[in-house]
Image (tube, rainbow, N blue to C red):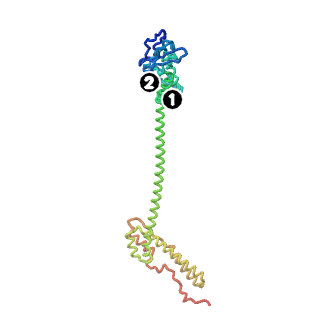
Amino acid sequence: MVDTYNPIIGQEKIKGWRLFQQRPVPDAQTALVFSGEGQPLLTIKQGQRGITSGEMVWGKYHVLYRVDLTEHPLSFRCDLPCKTDAFVFNAEVTFICSVHNPAMIVQRNVTDVSQVLKPLIVEVMRSKSRNYDTEDSGIAERDIGNSVKQAIYDAGFQVNRFVLELSLEKEAREHIREKTRIQKQTEIEKTRLQSSIELERQQRELDKQRQEYELERKKRDEEFELERMKLKMDFYGPMIQAGNWQILAMQLAQNPEDVQVIVQQLNQQTQLEREHQMKMLKMLIDEDALEGSQITEVSKVALQKLLGIAEQSIPKIKGSSNQNANAQDAVLDVNPTDNDTSEVKTPDFDDWDEDD
């Protein structure tokens, strides 16, 4: 592959042409350019109408140029600046060049293609390469190639198969490798951090759901326990009120864990009896229905009942092995068979003398 060539392959003066002398005719690889004083350059290519014999005889054109239209492979190397001045692109340019405008080549007297095209190509490539960083060499190659083709065409030449290869110095390649490694490491760390944050968020959400579930479960257990206690109290309540202690004892023997329910029922009944007796005493006093001696007697009886109720103790259930036996004793100790002792008898006011 050569570095340059001369596109003007021949030049001759037109003198002494006879009228019937054979005129020059261009072939497929050559263009004829006629030059004359005060006349524009005349280009004739193969298949076009040429100059007449009269124009050649009477001296309208004085010089004939033969311009090479064939394609010539050319190449050169150069350094191009990149976006940062720290590094450069090593450019290797190869292309196929041919004359596009023979008249322009003659007018500019281009005898060395490389001297004309290389500075033009380098100028265009440098102006474009400054827009790209070292790692953008692929994009830079395509953009620079398109710009160079247009600039060469405007200079009277045509370029085919223009190839630009950009390479980097060893330091630039190592810089890119290190930069790429850091970027990848940063992306990995960023991904890891995002994953960690997401995992923590999911863990907090899971803990929140677990707490909500535990609260809901505890609430359901409490509601279930309250409902169970209510059912048991509804079951044992009529037995206690009716004094069916034998049936109650048999039931507790089979279900010793229900002792606490029975104790609670008995305590509630005791509290109700206490409140009832206090209301009776207060009513008698408020209505002034008792004389002094009667108030003393009634108060004494009521206070005895209240003290007796307060001094009663609830037996404790000790150990699972004695539950069946203790259940029956607990009921019999707290609630005697004789219910009459727990009631306050209302005095027979008919036997007392009325006040005059």
Residue 73: image location, x then y, percent: 43, 20
Which residue is drawn at the image coordinates 41% and 17% (left, top)? 27
Residue lying at the far top in this picture: please name it: 16
Q: Secondary structure at mark 1?
A: loop
- The disc at residue 160 is 2
| Disc with the residue nearer the chain's start (2 vs 1) | 1
Residue 135: image location, x then y, percent: 48, 30
Q: Quadrant of the C terminus?
A: bottom right
* Label 1 crowd (10 A; few <14 / some 14-19 / many >=20): some
In terms of depth relative to the viewer, which is nearer, 34 or 108? 34
- From the image, tell me which residue sits under label 1: 133
> Can you tell which quarter of the image residue 75 is in?
top left
266 is higher (above) or lower (below) than 352? above
Residue 316: image location, x then y, percent: 44, 68
Residue 4, visible in the rendered structure: no
Residue lying at the far right in this picture: please name it: 356
Q: Quadrant of the N terminus?
A: top left
178 is higher (above) or lower (below) than 319? above
